[in-house]
Amino acid sequence: MRPPFAHLARPLASPRGARLLFIFLTLAGLLAFAAAPGLKRTLGLNHFNLWFSDSYAVLAAVDAHRAGLDTLVANPLDLLDRPHSYTDWWYALGPLGLTRADNFLVGASWVAAFLLVTWLTLRPTHPGAALGCTLLVLSPPVLLALNRANNDLVIFTLLGLAALLLHPRRPWSWLPALALIALATGLKFYPVVGAAIFLLVRPARRLTAALALAVPVLALVLRDVLPDIARGQFPLPPGLYCMGAGQLFRDLGYPGPGVPLFAGLLLAIPAWALVRARLTTGLADDSRDFAPRALFLLGAATLTACFLAGISYGYRWIFSLWLAPWLLATRRDLTLAPSRRRLATATGSLLLLIVWLDGTYCLVTNALVGPMPSAQLQSWQLTWRLGTQPLSWIFFTLLTGWIADALRCAFTTLRSPVLPRSPAPSPPA
């Protein structure tokens, strides 16, 4: 006897059906989130009861710059009096005629661009993958970015387009990809690490050309925005929905200098052990689909750089979406060693757990405990952060292992490029 609704489930089993299911689920979830302000408060995402507050801050800085005001101090044109904390490149919105009155249009366009690139890059191939990708897109950190229309959505869009343009069978596709990475770097510093995607370019001569041009171009961009970097370095208060190695050190009582270096060593040593054990491998395997590998390296490099740099708002987890395609493909590839498949499964499960942890905490405490004194709230959150931070360190150790293996393979390619095979000698007549 045929299972009920089998005729309905069959189309979803195709890659096209899975992608349509993914788009439908994400849109339905986002509409439900927008229509339920109580859910936003329960999840701890109620940012001053404002929608698109971060795009408003950018437009307010543009208006202040146009009016000749000092944008580096409290901006009276912003709803929250925030100073401009990004580079001067954002002032280019001024000549386009955009003002604070256009905030809904600007914020909605950033959200729409993010969703479009998300659908183009994730592309699940079966219903289970569609569900997993939906859980990532509807996770609280991503909803936080969409609610605020943070300009990280613009960075995500630019870097995602760079990954889509890069193609192993188009020899010069790395040039437009480099242009997009340079633009993203000029807007927000940290996307410079997106150049890690060029580590997968082959053959050796093309890899050499990409790296030889990327280094001076991105160095020039960084030199141009170097005076603006200090704007984005401001202390974040202890709380939830933050990420970064500095968070654990601060909670343990050491907020001092040297944290990025020390944290880098704590990640690098076990990561190198993973590389030596041949566990975090596969990104440089040219026999496998290029796009998921490139997206994974792009997301891993961006996330890890942000993790080591300090403490960031949790919406930086939007870049974790690009880890999903390769992890899902590795998990289902029966030709791979079981250890590699298990590691991909464990990493994907750990990612889902991490991005939902703080939201689950807020959901449970708000639903079951309710309001509490500020001191008790801070104490509970400190205990929660100390208990959950080790999961992030394990996760970023794994990402660092894959990044290190990609570096190793690129270095090997540059040292020992594969030479074209000589034709075999003709047999004697």
Image (cartoon, rainbow, N blue to C red):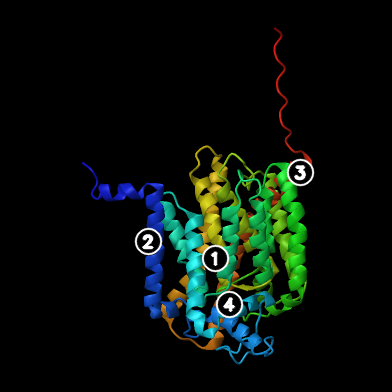
Residue type of the residue flagged with mark 2:
Phe
Q: Earlier in the sequence, mark 3 or mark 4?
A: 4
Q: Give the CA distance from mark 1 to mark 2.
A: 19 Å
Q: Give the CA distance from mark 4 to mark 2.
A: 34 Å
Q: Secondary structure at mark 3?
A: helix
Residue beneath label 3, please?
Answer: 414
Label 3: few (<14), some or many (≥20) within 10 Å? some
Q: Nearer the viewer, mark 4 or mark 2?
A: 4
Question: Image point 74% across, 33% down: which residue?
Answer: 419
Give x and y (percent) for residue 307.
65, 66
Disc assigned to residue 96:
4
Residue beneath label 1, please?
Answer: 318
Q: Quadrant of the N terminus?
A: top left
Label 1: few (<14), some or many (≥20) within 10 Å? many
Residue type of the residue flagged with mark 4:
Leu
Q: Quadrant of residue 67?
A: bottom right
Residue beneath label 2, please?
Answer: 24
Q: Give the CA distance from mark 1 to mark 4.
A: 28 Å
Q: CB of mark 4 within 8 Å of CB of mark 2?
A: no
Give x and y (percent) for residue 359.
48, 72
Q: Secondary structure at mark 4?
A: helix
Task: Say above or below: 101 vs 259.
Answer: below
Q: Nearer the viewer, mark 1 or mark 2?
A: 2
- Evaluate whether residue 36 shows in this view: yes
Residue type of the residue flagged with mark 1:
Ile
Camera-side residue: 275 or 120? 120
Label 2: few (<14), some or many (≥20) within 10 Å? few
Determine the residue located farthest toward the top in the rendered image.
429
Q: Earlier in the sequence, mark 1 or mark 3?
A: 1
Task: Say above or below: 41 vs 272.
Answer: below
Q: Secondary structure at mark 2?
A: helix
